[in-house]
Image (spheres, rainbow, N blue to C red):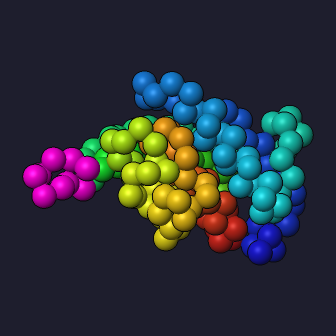
């Protein structure tokens, strides 16, 4: 798949994304997750900005928590966190913009204190609670991780198919 990337681009720098929201710590989480997905896919070598053939710049522009599902008493039973961010991939050798797009990812979470017992498929893998060995922790934090992972995967997929 890496053959679709311009041949002179062998490396990428992924600096800390800019956070234009009030959500504390989200920039670090998104940046780390994008780097992890790039490492898993092994499509470009991750280097510092001074030595890179390309740079991926990101900016978190919006985070929204909103009701997602309701119970029979019309009370909210699940919320959905949606994260939107602008991403720009720049060819540093030719000073050219290769990709510019707004990405959105979301994750659902319930109001219970532990997602291992909330009856929700929090990560969309078709498994619920005890049947899902990676569902644990604070609900909103986990939903945020799912949203971030979706964005990171979309970014990598777009870079692979941009050319």
Horizontal side of residue 16 vs 4, given as left or right:
left
Q: Quadrant of the C terminus?
A: bottom right
Q: Residue at x 19, y 54 (%)?
A: 70
Q: Residue at x 31, y 47 (%)?
A: 79
Horizontal side of residue 135 vs 93, given as left or right:
left
Q: Quadrant of the N terminus?
A: bottom right
Q: Nearer the viewer, residue 80 or 15?
A: 80
Q: Nearer the viewer, residue 17 or 146?
A: 146
**Observer able to see residue 52:** yes
- Counting the numbered discs, the total is 0
Quadrant of residue 162 in the image?
A: bottom right
Residue span colored magenta: 69-77
Position of residue 63 measured from the top left corner of the image (x, y, whole percent) = 40, 38
Position of residue 52 measured from the top left corner of the image (x, y, whole percent) = 84, 44
Q: Is residue 71 magenta?
A: yes
Q: Residue at x 83, y 47 (%)?
A: 46
């Amino acid at each position: 798949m890496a053959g679709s990337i311009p041949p002179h681009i062998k490396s990428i720098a992924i600096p800390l994304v800019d956070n234009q929201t009030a959500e504390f710590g989200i920039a670090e989480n998104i940046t780390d997750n994008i780097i992890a997905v790039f490492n898993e896919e092994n499509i470009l070598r991750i280097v510092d900005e001074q030595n890179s053939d390309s740079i991926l710049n990101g900016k978190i522009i919006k985070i929204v928590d909103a009701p997602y599902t309701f119970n029979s008493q019309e009370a909210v039973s699940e919320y959905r966190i949606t994260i939107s961010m602008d991403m720009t991939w720049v060819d540093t050798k030719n000073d050219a913009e290769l990709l510019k797009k707004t990405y959105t990812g979301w994750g659902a979470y319930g109001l219970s204190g532990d997602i291992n017992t909330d009856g929700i498929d929090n990560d969309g893998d078709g498994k619920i609670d005890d049947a899902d060995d990676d569902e644990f922790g604070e609900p909103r934090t986990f939903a945020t991780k799912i949203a971030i992972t979706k964005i990171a995967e979309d970014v990598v997929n777009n870079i692979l198919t941009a050319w």
